[in-house]
Image: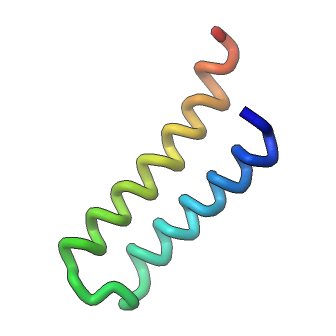
Amino acid sequence: MNKYLEICVYFISLFGYFLAEYTKIIKDEKLRKKLSFIFNLIAVLILLYDFVLKKFI
């Protein structure tokens, strides 16, 4: 994957996580928690790919 694309996706997922977790833009609490979890999962998976899987592939 292109390095610039990885950086963009990572920061977008972090922004989405903070937007969903710490703001009241999304009124529904369950939907906000689900979005927060999804964005956090995307960020963690990208970091896992960068630091662990890239060395073995």
Residue visible at 80% across and 47% down in the picture: 4
**Splitting the image into 4 quarters, where does residue 11 fall?**
bottom right
Q: Which is more toward the observer, 11 or 22?
A: 11
Residue visible at 53% across and 49% down in the picture: 43
Residue visible at 64% across and 9% down in the picture: 56
Give the colouring mode of the picture: rainbow
Q: Is residue 29 left or right of residue 54?
A: left
Relative to 35, residue 10 above or below: above
**Splitting the image into 4 quarters, where does residue 39 fall?**
bottom left
Q: Position of residue 44 (x, y in %)?
A: 50, 43
Relative to 2, residue 19 above or below: below
Q: Quadrant of the N terminus?
A: top right
Q: Is residue 48 left or right of residue 9?
A: left
Residue visible at 30% across and 74% down in the picture: 32
Q: Position of residue 52 (x, y in %)?
A: 60, 22
Q: Is residue 31 left or right of residue 50?
A: left
Q: Position of residue 8 (x, y in %)?
A: 71, 55
Q: Quadrant of the C terminus?
A: top right
**Splitting the image into 4 quarters, where does residue 40 fall?**
bottom left
Relative to 40, residue 56 above or below: above
Q: Position of residue 42 (x, y in %)?
A: 48, 47
User: How many numbered marks, from 0 up?
Assistant: 0
Residue lying furthest top in this view?
56
